[in-house]
Image: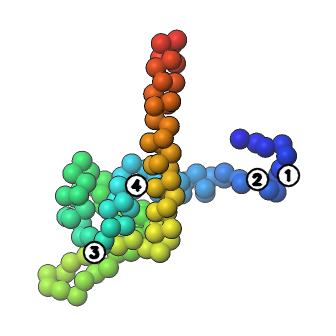
Amino acid sequence: MNDTAHTGADLLQVSAPHRELLDQVLDKWSLQVLDQLCGRPLRFNELRRAIPAIGQKSLTTTLRRLERNGMIERLVLPVRPVAVEYRIAPVGDTLNQLVDALLQWTTQNMTEVELSRKRFDAQN
């Protein structure tokens, strides 16, 4: 990953805070929650139905982490009984094109990755 043509100041640094943020934003459930909320605001149970494999505790944890990182917004609706809606925040919306690019990359390269895995597994 180091390019000797660049000075140290030119290179992007992957520090502990960067790794932590990437881990929290690009994990399995966060990606799915963000994908759903990019479409439209949703309530908690709507998210659970949209992502059937996620448990209640995992969804709660994911939503809190995404809200803490500024990726989503939690809005208490002025209705009775009280309802909460989650929506993508402006910072979270900036991830949309990046995640789409990563998904496109995986689609374009999956065949080569699978071949590499088979070769590696056969040798080990």
Gap in angstroms between the C-alphas marked 1 and 4: 34 Å
In the image, 109 versus 122, the foreground residue is 109
Element type at mark 2: loop
Element type at mark 3: strand
**Residue under label 2:** 11
**Residue under label 4:** 31
From the viewer's perspective, is residue 78 above or below residue 1? below
Gap in angstroms between the C-alphas marked 2 and 3: 40 Å
Element type at mark 4: helix
Q: Are marks 2 and 3 in contact (CB under 8 Å)?
A: no
From the viewer's perspective, is residue 99 above or below residue 118? below
Gap in angstroms between the C-alphas marked 1 and 3: 46 Å
Q: Are marks 2 and 1 in contact (CB under 8 Å)?
A: yes
* Residue at the outermost bottom position: 78
Q: Residues within 10 Å of mark 2 (few under 14, many from 20)?
A: few
Drawn side of residue 14 relative to residue 113, left or right: right
Q: Which residue is pictured at 14% across the width and 85% down the height? A: 80
**Residue under label 1:** 7
Query: If you read the primary sequence from the N terminus, does the residue marked by circle 2 or circle 3 appear first?
Result: 2
- Inspect this view and state whether residue 114 appears: yes
Gap in angstroms between the C-alphas marked 2 and 4: 27 Å
Task: Give the image location of residue 19, x and y in percent.
Answer: 58, 51
The amino acid beneath tag 1 is Thr
The amino acid beneath tag 4 is Leu
Query: If you read the primary sequence from the N terminus, does the residue marked by circle 1 or circle 3 appear first?
Result: 1
Q: Which residue is pictured at 52% across the width and 58% down the height? A: 98
Query: If you read the primary sequence from the N terminus, does the residue marked by circle 3 or circle 4 appear first?
Result: 4
The amino acid beneath tag 3 is Glu
Q: Are marks 1 and 3 in contact (CB under 8 Å)?
A: no
Query: If you read the primary sequence from the N terminus, does the residue marked by circle 2 or circle 4 appear first?
Result: 2
